[in-house]
Amino acid sequence: MPNATAHIKRIRLHQGDLPADLSLNGSIAVDTEATGLEILTRDRLCLVQLCERADEQGSECHLVQIAPEQNEAPRLKKLLEDKNRVKIFHYARFDLAILKKALDIQTAPVYCTKIASKIARSYSSAHGLKDLCKEFIGIDMSKKQQCSDWGREKLSEAQKQYAALDVVYLHEIKEQLDAMLMREERTELADECFLALLTRVRLDLEGWREQDIFSH
């Protein structure tokens, strides 16, 4: 089994925002960590992870730590709202909502590997990031740090490694899902779902999170 950290060249931790001199190219893989999953009334955004496509040495991952009561990150906002860059998420619905609520970031355009997996991999009911990494990359990811304290002032090395691993494989997973979507003639359907995500997130944030508004 391949080493789960082999694709990571370097992890850089930033406080509050991306540095002014940082230049990232092309599409960006993105993830977030929070104090919990109840973003509307209780939990807060703690970390934003970003990773561009790997070069021959691997990927450099950037972690932006968000302070309590922080409500803006201008350079991060500019990057995530750049219409010329695709932002790749896994379960984008949560990440888009917490980025909008915490930092007023309207992220677009978006690609969600979980949605793409559900449309392309209709032979499977397993669509978690761990499942996709195992099938497409041959890596068995540990999710041990998923439920750790992301609100702590100083992140552990294990947390930083975990946070980086949540984004480092998304580019490769997207490529393989794109090939499957094209093979099954479902690319257009997936693209329409990605476009609808911003509306789904707005419904979540405005109180319709648990309701299927299209039901009878």
Image (cartoon, grey):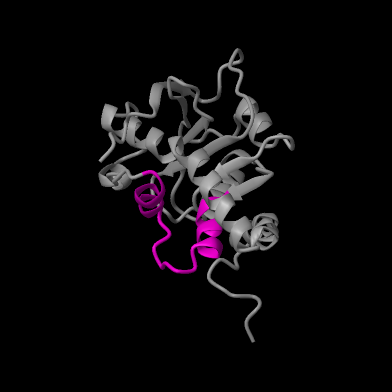
Residue 121: x and y in percent read 49, 63
- Residue 167: image quadrant is top left
Residue 39 visible at all: yes
Q: Residue at x 36, y 54 (%)?
A: 131
Q: Residue at x 58, y 17 (%)?
A: 22
Q: In screen coordinates, is 51 left or right of 133?
A: right
Magenta-span inclusion, residue 131: yes
Is 10 drawn above or below residue 103 in the view shown? Answer: above
Question: How many numbered tags mark residues here?
Answer: 0
Is 55 drawn above or below residue 124 in the view shown? Answer: above
- Residue 17: image quadrant is top right
Residue 51: x and y in percent read 51, 30
Q: In screen coordinates, is 19 left or right of 104?
A: left
Q: In screen coordinates, is 200 left or right of 59?
A: right
Quadrant containing the C terminus is bottom right
Q: Residue furthest toward the bottom?
A: 216
Q: Which residues lie in the magenta part?
A: 112-137
Q: Nearer the viewer, residue 83 or 131?
A: 131
Q: Residue at x 52, y 48 (%)?
A: 176
Residue 87: x and y in percent read 61, 40
Is 182 drawn above or below residue 10 in the view shown? Answer: below
